[in-house]
Image (cartoon, rainbow, N blue to C red):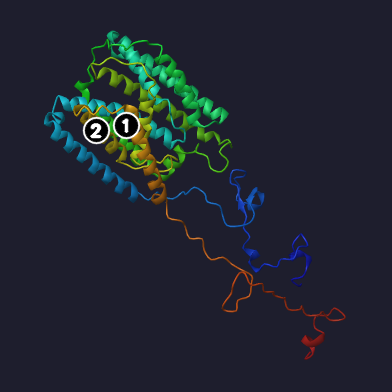
């Protein structure tokens, strides 16, 4: 049998002149078949190098820990400035008010962070928080539970409805939640004047409990997000390849949980903000709180793409902003909340670039490529070389294997 037999020929009659042509690769789409037989899978690319795919390895947490050290130092610096401005600011009862504000902002940030990790950033958290503040301000005199329960039910139901729309129609989460947020803004702007809080619940009595609960959830979420299987399960809805392609049914569960959780967190944040101050609730859009929540999640180390996140970053970022807001209020700097939100958001985008550049897993070795060209010691893939197979031995005339030169001695 010779190498020139039709069994070993290419199906087309094209002559291969490039000696590097045997580096041709075929990548198969795992979504089209679950069998190990590569011949039954649909080819995606047929030439060139392998396209980049999402890494399954563990993220390098060094960049996150390094950035969290920077956040810790910034938090300490702002705390020092606040203490220098008014030493009573970090003592009770002023400290209780700080912790309550930090818990409310922390709940917004937790909801924003989880929705980012799930690939469905919830842009409605700010309007939901403002609507919940109005709900408590108008019904707080009936008690905390009667005023809070309807808001929690409506918030959870709204998150579920948006999640169903996102999963069923497979539309971007930010677009669906923005549409929902615009609808919630209509509810908030039905008020023509600020609403005075009617309830008598004072969250400062549970200040340490509220802030401690937020801190525990933040650390637990950061630790779970660093586990590879959990991270991939939560981010199953994130697009890979064609963003309009529908994912499998397993992607629906984390989307539903993330949108419901973020909406419920926004309801809790709005209630705490309304009950923790003596000022009336002013009509608005609430989008500034959306910017603060998502901006702090980004600033804490959560990537805008959702693939990566830190452990302590959310806690440090929320603490730093809470101290800054109190410092700004005591110095009467009168900085607009929208300006603060824009600044935090812009800084968070820079952090996203940082963690995406230095936080991805190390690339795996690609191995040595095999080439059919003959080697002369200074081989170059651009220099064409040919190789001819040696001629096959001729069979004996009468078909006997022991005739001819092999059977001469017999």
Residue at the extreme right of the image, as rendered: 398
Residue 190 as seen in the image, left or right of residue 27: left
Quarter holding the N terminus is bottom right
Quarter of the view holding residue 195: top left
Cα distance, mark 1 to mark 2? 10 Å
Horizontal arrangement in the rendering, residue 140 relative to residue 57 (left or right): left
In the image, residue 2 above or below residue 124: below
Seen in the picture, residue 16 relative to 29 is either above or below; the reply is below
| Image point (15%, 31%), residue name | 90
Q: Decide if residue 173 is on the left or right side of residue 135.
A: right
Q: Are marks 1 and 2 in contact (CB under 8 Å)?
A: yes
Give the tally of numbered discs: 2
Could you say which disc has been placed on residue 324 in the image? 2
Disc 1 crowd rating (10 Å Cα; few below 14, some 14-19, many 20+) is: some
In this view, the residue farthest toward the top is 142
Q: Secondary structure at mark 1?
A: helix
Query: Tag on residue 121?
Result: none
User: Foreground: 27 or 349?
Assistant: 349
Q: Which quadrant holds residue 218? A: top left
Other-residue count near label 2 (Cα within 10 Å), few / some / many at <14 / 14–19 / ≥20: some
Q: Which residue is mark 1?
A: 340
From the top left corner, tell me how far across and down residue 44 is, in percent: 63, 49
* Vertical placement of residue 318 versus 398, above or below: above
Q: Secondary structure at mark 2?
A: helix
- Residue 125 shows in the view: yes
Taking 195 as reference, is 241 left or right? right
Q: Position of residue 160 (x, y in %)?
A: 47, 23
**Identity of the residue drawn at 46% across and 38% down:** 235
The structure residue drawn at horizontal position 40% and vertical position 41%, both measured from the top left corner, is 303
């Amino acid at each position: 049998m010779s190498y020139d037999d039709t069994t070993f020929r290419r199906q087309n009659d094209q002559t291969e002149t490039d000696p590097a042509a045997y580096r041709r690769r075929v990548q198969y789409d795992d979504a089209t078949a679950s069998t190990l037989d590569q011949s039954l899978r649909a080819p995606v690319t047929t030439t060139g190098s392998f396209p980049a795919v999402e890494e399954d390895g563990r993220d390098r947490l060094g960049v996150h820990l390094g950035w969290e050290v920077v956040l810790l130092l910034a938090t300490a610096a702002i705390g020092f400035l606040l203490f220098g401005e008014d030493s009573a600011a970090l003592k009770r009862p002023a400290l209780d008010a700080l912790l309550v504000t930090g818990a409310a902002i922390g709940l917004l940030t937790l909801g924003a962070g989880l929705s980012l990790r799930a690939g469905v950033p919830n842009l409605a958290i700010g309007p939901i928080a403002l609507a919940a503040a109005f709900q408590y301000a108008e019904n707080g005199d009936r008690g905390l539970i009667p005023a809070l329960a309807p808001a929690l039910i409506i918030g959870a139901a709204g998150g579920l409805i948006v999640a169903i729309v996102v999963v069923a129609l497979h539309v971007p989460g930010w677009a669906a939640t923005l549409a929902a947020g615009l609808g919630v803004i209509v509810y908030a702007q039905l008020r023509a004047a600020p609403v005075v809080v009617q309830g008598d619940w004072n969250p400062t009595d549970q200040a340490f409990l509220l802030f401690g609960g937020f801190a525990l959830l933040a650390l637990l979420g950061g630790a779970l997000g660093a586990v590879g299987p959990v991270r991939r399960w939560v981010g199953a809805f994130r697009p890979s390849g064609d963003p309009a392609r529908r994912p499998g049914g397993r992607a629906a569960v984390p989307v539903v949980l993330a949108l419901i959780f973020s909406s419920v967190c926004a309801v809790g944040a709005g209630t705490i903000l309304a009950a923790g101050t003596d000022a009336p609730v002013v009509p608005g859009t609430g989008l500034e709180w959306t910017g603060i929540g998502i901006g702090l999640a980004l600033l804490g180390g959560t990537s805008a793409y959702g693939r990566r996140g830190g452990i302590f970053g959310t806690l440090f970022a929320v603490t730093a902003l809470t101290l800054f807001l109190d410092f700004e209020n005591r110095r009467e700097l009168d900085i607009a909340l929208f300006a603060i939100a824009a600044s935090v958001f812009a800084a968070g985008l820079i952090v996203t670039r940082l963690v995406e550049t230095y936080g991805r897993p190390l690339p795996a070795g690609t191995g040595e490529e095999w080439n059919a060209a003959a080697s002369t010691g200074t081989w170059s893939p651009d220099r064409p070389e040919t190789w001819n197979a040696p001629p096959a031995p001729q069979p004996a005339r009468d078909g006997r294997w022991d005739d001819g030169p092999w059977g001469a001695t017999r």
